[in-house]
Amino acid sequence: MRWWATVVSVWLCSLPVVSAQSEDWLVLPTTTDDAREWMVPTVGSVSRALRKQGIGVWSPTRAEMRLQNVGPRPPAAVGAKEYDAWRERTSEAVLQLAGGEYREALPRLEESQAFARSSVETLNRDPTRAQAAMDTCLFLVRALAGTGEDRRAARQAEECVVLSPGMEPSTFMHPPNVMDLYERAKDSVRSGRSALLVESEPPGCALYLNGEPAGETPTQLTGLFPGRYRVQVECDPDRPGAVHIVEILPGTQALFVFDAFDSAVELDPVVHLQYESPPPQEELIRHTRELARVLPASSVVLASKLSSGAIELRLVEGAQMEPAWVRIPSSGGGADSRNHEQAIATLLSRRCGDFSNREPLMVSCETGEIVEEDVAELPRRPPRGQFVAGLTLAGVGAGSLLSGYGLLIARKSAGDDWLSDPQSRAEQQKWMRLGTTIIATGSTGSALLVSAMPLVLPYKRRTPWWGWLTGGLGLASGGAAVALAVTAEPKRAESCRLSGPDPEPCVDRARRTDLALLLGVTAAPLMTIPLVYLFRGSDKRHDAKVVPVITASWSGAGFGLRGVF
């Protein structure tokens, strides 16, 4: 029984986590200056407001990691200090190779190769550094071959050719077996049948593949070996191009590069678009859509700081920017999160409003004039992860409680069987076990339902009529339970014994107390509904956040709640 409880507990605990992983929207700051301190708090507060609406949002860290993996991203900066440390580490490994210490040299060379792999677009721009990168790669081939990992050595030789296709190794630095692996890899790579079509806006820009010149756009690179390539398009010779990571597969791939978009994307302190001057709306939408495609994100909330210090939010969905906008106070000064939630609700309803002042104002999206209109209602449904967790708990709890009533019927039948054969120990034990099961099942179902109510009940300004109705039913059920328990016959222990004179009084009393117990545990979740709305209050209910906490071990499992509702 304990293992079953552990499995169920872990499953229930994982549901809200899994459901919260859907990150579909992006909060994207835009700016024309170097003031960035407002971005992190704004992205955080707007993201929280969206999640309370049940909308998944890209976290800043995940968005940055995604762009670093697929681009566009700034080229690697390799200073003299980093380069010298890399060369020193490689030199130490080469000395170990010379002494036949292949396994000792392998970790250093793998670290050096990882550095070269992540910086190849910068290293290959300089012939001396490109030569060092090629030789480092082949030193790793030598170490792998020396440890008997011939298959890995052959794959590594292919990577050497791919990373530096225009560079030849220093033959005097590598033994014949390594050069033989390199030549075979070169023949294999150069017979590649994959192709990459690269176009850009504007056209006629310099193209670099892994840091090596590859012509001008538009162009199609043929004979490529499958693998990961770092592509740069440079329309301004004084500015290095952003890096696009392209996974080359068999066949032909295409890459279209917007030079203005690559120039605008910045990753520090969060993913944002930065311009020298305000761009035309069409260009801003185009860049926003391109960033949404790369992540991907279904919708984007653009955030920009106004001269007044307020933050303006606009929604971009599909191919156009919605006419709706809202203004919120700057998050850098500790803005009211409630205003942010109301602003997001207004934005999602495709209306406009100014929430940067103490009193929210609804504004005409076309004229900018103040209109007599109610502020958008706050979300009526709890956050998605919380709602799914509560719905799961409610389903399991309702099933457990209903099972208790089913067991009540089964125990009545078992009691009749015992009364027909009072000396049967088997019938008595069956009847007693069912009583224990009814208590456990009914109590568990009631506890789960009570725990689920704060998680699933929609937000209301007042306790709804059905909340009072269920509370009344709960009081009636509780009153009936008390009445049944009070009017039950006093317990006579001898009547419940197998050797007793007559088990009928024991069975009759148990039937009343079993029903009283189930009515009592049924009353608890019914009375919880109005209590949830009363405890939430009209002002703090929108800050509701209840997190289920489940603990499990080999000795048992436990469930609890943490937070406020």
Image (cartoon, rainbow, N blue to C red):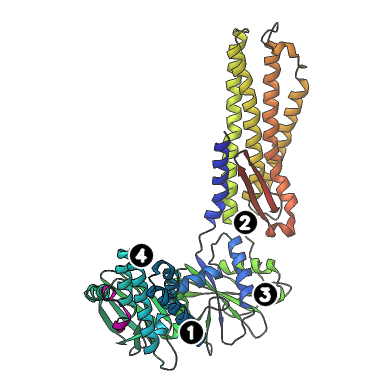
- 125 inside magenta stretch: no
Q: Which residues are magenta?
A: 165-178
Q: CA distance from mark 1 to mark 3?
A: 43 Å
Nearer the N terminus, badge 3 or badge 2?
Answer: 3
Q: Compared to 105, does 380 lie above or below?
A: above
**Mark 3: secondary structure:** helix
- In the rendering, which numbered label is found on residue 380? 2
Q: Estimate the spatial distance between the alpha carbons at disc 3 and disc 4, rounded to whole Å.
A: 57 Å
Going by the numbered disc 2, the residue's amino acid type is: Arg
Residue depicted at 73% across the width and 57% down the height: 538
- State the CA–CA distance, disc 2 to disc 1: 60 Å
Q: Is residue 173 visible?
A: yes
The image position of residue 385, as x and y in percent, is 57, 54
Query: Residue 276 vs residue 492: left or right?
Result: left
Earlier sequence position, callout 4 versus callout 2: 4
The amino acid type of the residue labelled 4 equals Thr
Q: Which mark is residue 331?
A: 3
The residue type indicated by label 1 comes to Asp
Q: Position of residue 1 (x, y in %)?
A: 57, 33
Residue 282 shows in the view: no
Residues packed near mark 1 inside 10 Å, few (<14), some (14 to 19) or many (20 plus): few
Residue matched to label 1: 84
Q: CA distance from mark 3 to mark 2?
A: 25 Å
Residue sitting nearer the eye, 123 or 443: 123
Image marks 2 and 1: residues in contact by CB distance under 8 Å: no
User: Are dots 3 and 2 in contact, CB under 8 Å?
Assistant: no
What residue is disc 4 on? 147
Crowdedness near tag 4: few (<14), some (14–19) or many (≥20) residues, C-alpha within 10 Å: some
Q: Nearer the viewer, residue 246 or 210?
A: 210
Tell me whether the residue at label 3 lies in contact with that at label 4, contact meaning CB atoms closer than 8 angstroms.
no
